[in-house]
Amino acid sequence: MPAPCSALRDREGDALPPSCIVSDACHPWTGGVARELGVSCFLFDGFCAFSSLCMCQMNLHRIFEGVVDDDTRPARVPAFPIDLVEIGHGLEATKRPFIWVVKPRNLAEFEWWLSEDGFESRVGETGLVIRDWAPQKVILLNPAMGAFVTHCGWNSVLECVAAGLPMVSCPHFAEQFMNEKLVVDVLRVGIKGAAQWGMEAEGVLATRQDVERAVAAVMDCGEEGSARRARAAELGRKAQEAVVHGGSSFRNVALLIQHVQQRASTRNPWIEKKPSDRR
């Protein structure tokens, strides 16, 4: 895509030429723009390194080449997400106070279910239902929070780790299942709370029994539950230390900025062009 590059280079009177390009990994053409400008290009990937490594290994060793899938049944996509109802009933069954943040595809049908089922009236002051957006980081950092039931998107996992909380995993699709593996089996700060991968065609990814069992386990005050919370708290402490002045993440970002500045000052066609050439 030469047009963005030309637009950047031909802007008149701009005293601050670009020093780098930060691009979504889905836009690889930005690498060519960066080469034209003589600056670094950094691709931002929404996957974590663990999931990316898993996918790389699967491709490298051709894991799926020998897999034959003879399941020709059509996948059933319900008008209203059944697993959302199951999660709600599971949270209610725990008889513990909770905040349930939902982003239903069809808000009208969700409101209809709440009304017909009487969910909000039953949970009363024990449960709070928030539609659409909520200040997730603020909620997770509240001392009253005991655990986080999550779909295992990487942003949510990071925020929960930084808050030092254990998790109940309810992944839905894509790399979320690999993030679950990291949380539950590698870091050991989570409990598996959903059905096995492959249940998507059945329309149910989590059952109320799964959610109730997992929440009870993650909130357990016994030896295993206490050890899990201790590991989560230790990860949270390390995450906080990494971003303060002098921490590992702080230093790495500082080195990245230094690299960008050095390269931009030594080789940038924008700077090298004469003023007359910019017209």
Image (spheres, rainbow, N blue to C red):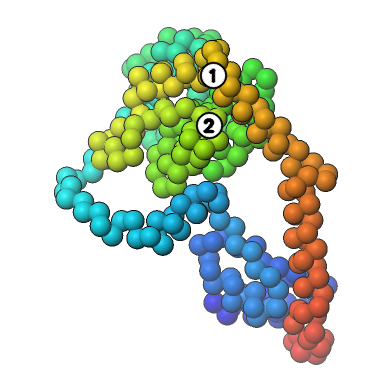
- Specify the quadrant of the image occupied by residue 211: top left
Rendered-image quadrant of the C terminus: bottom right
Query: How far apart in space, not on screen, are marks 1 and 2 (Cα)?
Result: 11 Å
Q: Position of residue 28 (x, y in %)?
A: 53, 69
Q: Which mark is residue 119?
A: none
CA neighbours of label 2 inside 10 A, class few (<14), some (14 to 19), many (20+): some
Q: Nearer the viewer, residue 276 or 186?
A: 186
Expressed as whole percent of the image width and height from the top left, the position of residue 261 reads: 80, 67
Q: Are marks 1 and 2 in contact (CB under 8 Å)?
A: no
Would you identify the image quadrant in which residue 172 lies?
Answer: top left
Label 1 sits on residue: 225
Residue 128 in picture, x, y percent from top left = 53, 18
Q: Which residue is mark 2?
A: 188
Query: Where in the figure is residue 87, as x and y percent of width and height?
Result: 40, 24
Helix, strand or loop at label 1? It is helix
- For image coordinates 67% across by 23% down, the residue present is 142
Res 135 → quadrant: top right
Q: Is residue 257 left or right of residue 112?
A: right
**Looking at the image, residue 41 lies above or below residue 73:** below
Task: Name the residue type under label 2.
Answer: Arg
In primary-sequence order, the first of circles 1 and 2 is 2
Residue at point 62%, 75% (across, down): 33
Amino acid type, label 1: Gly
